[in-house]
Structures are given as structure tokens and as C-alpha cells.
Amino acid sequence: MSQQTDSDDSSYPPLFRPRKTSQILRVDSDEINQKVQEFDPLPLIDFECINHKKLDEACREWGMFRLINHGIPLTHLKKLHDHAKALFSLTYEKKETSFSNIPISYFWGTPGLTPSGVAIQRGSSPLQNINWVEGFHVLLNLLSQLQYDDPTLESFRCVLEEYGRHQTRLATTIFEALALNLQLDCKRTRAYLSPATGHLRVHRYPCCYEAEQLQAWGIDVHTDSSVLSILHQDQVGGLQVYSHDQWFDVKPQFNSLIVHLGDMMQAMSDDIYVAAKHRVKVNKHKERMSVGYFVFPYENTVIESSKYKPFTYPDFRAEVQQDLKTVGHKIGLQKFKLNKTF
Ligand SMILES: O=C(O)CCC(=O)C(=O)O
Ligand SMILES: [Fe+2]
């Protein structure tokens, strides 16, 4: 059976385009029709009536939960995905030239970006640790200051702006609930979450025809550096979370969101809450899309805890960028630990 691709190859970054020999593949029907697990172990939180005990357990044990009744209309989620799909299907060259600057910049191959969205080269070789992903990095607080002449880009910008407002609303309320559970004082609660730092990453994971040979990941295992990240994924699946000593598939469910706790939240909670360890699998047969929202503390807020030396988010970010360049991966909170175990 010949391979079904979702997109024209010219829209893929050159490195992701199939080589001639890899276009005809035996389709493993088990893999395609993989039965969706009925049981979803991921904790479920209803945004309309937050159960604080359940939320606390989810944050201690998983660092991740599924959010329902979030108040973002389904029509808006569909609009966001439709616009993103149309833009991803532009040629690779067009994406590079149309989105070469803030507030919306195009990237591929690496989730490691500077604050303005420039890809960080990892390790000494440009091909080292390539992740099978491309995306748009969107700085939400600058979105309203720009208008595109092109109506398609302008319409995408407006949809992103509205989606960003929803994410700010959700993150603020969720963070307040977490701060209450952790009994953080008012001063810290205010300083630890800066809505102005919010940004989006709209991802497309191209089909990866040689998944086994390349041992590729959509995004390899990591924790987010944020306080909170809120993810919306399409119906394809591929996101996995590590908890209770094993990997779990995070089932796709278009009308729900996936909230991740990031490194900043783990430090703020004195390690009571965990940053979710997660990764994204590649798919030989289907492209996948997801939209992540990431929010951070105020730039000059010092995070104080009994487990880590005091640090600001910019200190943490500088360390991560340095490690990506020198060792090729993020070391993260371990670098700031007071009693290092290694
Ligand atoms: O696309 C996903 O499911 C996850 C993306 C992600 O982990 C990230 O951008 O940090
Ligand atoms: Fe992530």
C-alpha cells in the first residue's frame, strides 16, 4: 500500500522531506488502527468547579492534568487549528520569509528557542538532536502592536490574540488555586506569575517515514521551564507523560486542554509539586498539530525555596541556553539544587 501523506513535501523543512526510497512503506495496520485505550489515567479537573484536593494530588503525582469546561468555544479551537494548518502548508521558504521576526517567528528542528524565538543550536553539529517538529513562536504581548497586510496572516494573528486571552484567563485562575493549596503568601502569588510573559508555540509534527532508522522524536523527553504550560492537541496523539515509574499516552480529546506544571512551579512549591516529564512520539502516517501556551514569573522575581539557591527566571533561562549549546541538552533545576545528589 502506498504511503498516505497529509502535506505537500515542499511545505516540510528540507531535512524532513522523504527520501525517494522511503516513500513506499509497508503500512502496519495494527499501528494505524491502534486501539485507543479506553481508560484514561490522567487526572481530570473541571475548571468550572475546581476540586482543590484533586488538583493537589494531580500536581504532586503527575505534574499534569486534563482540564475540562475551560470556556474556550469549540469553534474557536477549530478556527485556530484550521488557520495553523493552512499556514503550515505554505512552502518552507514562504514560512521562513513571512515569519522571520517577532511577534510571530517560524522555527523547525528544535524546541530550544531564545525569548524572541530564535532557535538555539544544540551541540557542535547542526544535525545533533533534531526534533521532528516545526512551529510558530508567538509573543502574545506584542501581537496587538502589529497588523499584517496579508489577510490570511492578519486573520491568524487575530485568532491567536483571542486564544491568548483565554489562556491568560485560565493560567491566572489555575495558578491562584495552586498558590492557595501551597499556602503561598499574597506577595509571592502576585510576583510568581507574569501574564505578560505568555507566549504560544503552534506546532506541526511532520510524518516521519523512517522513524525507526532515525530514532527520531517529535520532541524528546523534557520538562517545560515555565510556571505553567497549557496544551491543546488535535486528534492524532503522540504526547506521553512519565508518572508512577512509567510512560502514559496522553489521549487526544479535542475539547479538553492539558495543563503541565513546569520547572518554575516545581521550585516555587519546594518540590512538593513536580514538573511533568513528557515527550512527543513521531508518527509515520499522520501529521500532528498542537498549540502550547507557556507562562513565566516576572523577570526580576527571585524564586525562594528551601531546595534551591535563590534564582530568577532569566538566571535559569541563561543556564538552560548555555547547557543546550555546550552539552546539547537541558540540565534544568539540578543546576540550582542546594544539596546536589550528583
Ligand atoms: O506537542 C505537544 O504535545 C507537546 C509540546 C511540548 O512539549 C512543548 O512545546 O514543550
Ligand atoms: Fe513541553
Image (cartoon, helix red, strand yellow):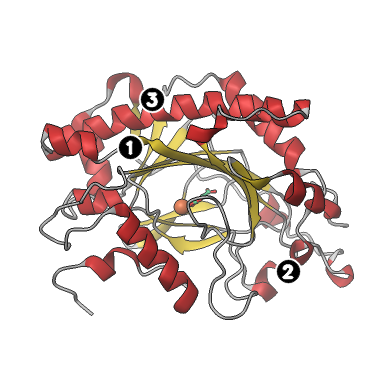
The circle drawn on residue 194 is 1
Q: Say which amino acid is labelled 3.
A: Arg
Q: How far apart are marks 2 and 3 (CA)?
A: 41 Å
Secondary structure at numbered mark 3: helix
Is residue 265 shown left or right of residue 242?
left
Q: Say which amino acid is labelled 2.
A: Glu
**Residue at x 84%, y 55% (from the top left corner):** 9
Camera sees residue 54: no
- Give above or below for 268 relative to 284: above
Position in image of residue 202 (x %, y %): 59, 42
The circle drawn on residue 169 is 3
Q: Say which amino acid is labelled 1.
A: Ser
Quick one: quadrant of the C terminus? bottom left
> Would you identify the image quadrant in which residue 155 lies?
top right
The circle drawn on residue 210 is 2
Query: Are dots 2 and 1 in contact, CB under 8 Å?
Result: no
Position in image of residue 235 (x %, y %): 61, 39
Position in image of residue 36 (x %, y %): 56, 44
Q: Which of marks 2 and 1 is nearer the N terminus?
A: 1
Q: Distance between the residues labelled 2 and 1?
A: 41 Å
